[in-house]
Amino acid sequence: MNIIIGLVITFGCVLGGFMAMGGHLDVLVQPFELVIIGGAGLGGFIMANPMKVVKDSGKALVEAFKHSVPKERAYLDVLGVLYSLMRDLRTKSRNEIEAHIDNPEESSIFQAAPTVLKNKDLTAFICDYVRLIIIGNARSHEIEALMDEEINTILHDKMKPYHSIVTMSDAFPAIGIVAAVLGVIKAMGKINESPEVLGGLIGAALVGTMLGIVLSYSVTSPIAAQIKIVRTKQHRLYIIVKQTLLAYMNGSVPQVALEYGRKTISSYERPSIDAVEQEMMNPGGENKAA
């Protein structure tokens, strides 16, 4: 929603200001200038990135427009799953724990947390490190180093759409100049026309420069920033898992280990202690009520 509001304000002010100065909107209607700039930008984007990144960029754009960041329910689901697994690690046999992590789709623990189960990568991350805890041979600092490496790799992959779109955004002003030069070339081909015709052709050419700058700094760059915000907040779930499991491995009881994870959540979005305690007593309570 913020992106839509921002675009309305941006184009409303740009076009409104132009009209207030006495400009005519029909001069700005240059679809082929937009084809040149947009086509060159998109073509370069496809050339520069593997198809997997191109597809993920489309997904990232949808997430940005929807602002698909974790809500309180998602944080509570992660903490609830971790608490249930840590509690079982203390009280149940290895075979019983392995039943949950080997087949999370059929696990009662994961089924009580649909937002976790829906996130296949996060589910696999949790299961992999709980499995390492069960084995019992790895030290906590070794697990921490391994977690950091994997988390950094995941973040690097998730940020590829952001970096790709920023690169395309940086190219738009130069591509706009290309469109403007092509427009000037067209105008020079009609140098013998009247000043009115020649002025219209040159004005149309300059629209390319304007479009390139506006597309870069007022459209694609802010959208890329929103992608970074969304993907960074989604990545926070892995940090919660890391801190919680490390605290457990270092001797904290499950209730205290959850606090290590909860404290990594931004204060603007962090569930209260009471909400976490309620989740421990009734995992996925809101989902069951629904």
Image (cartoon, rainbow, N blue to C red):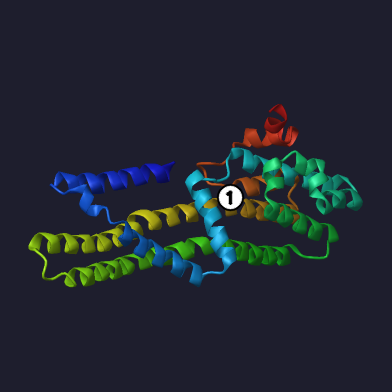
Residue at the image point whose x is 88% and y is 46% from the top = 92
Residue in front for this viewpoint, 141 or 148? 148
Up the image or down, 104 lies above or below 210; here it is above
Q: Position of residue 265 (x, y in %)?
A: 57, 47
Residue at the image point whose x is 76% and y is 41% from the top = 111
The residue labelled by disc 1 is 264
Residue at the image point whose x is 58% and y is 44% from the top = 70
Q: How many marks?
A: 1
Q: Quadrant of residue 279?
A: top right
Residue in front for this viewpoint, 70 or 260? 70
Quadrant in which the C terminus is drawn:
top right
Q: Secondary structure at mark 1?
A: loop
Q: Is residue 202 visible?
A: yes
Q: Is residue 247 visible?
A: no
* Residue type indicated by callout 1: Thr
Question: Would you say 142 lies left or right of 99 here?
Answer: left
Q: Position of residue 30 (x, y in %)?
A: 28, 56
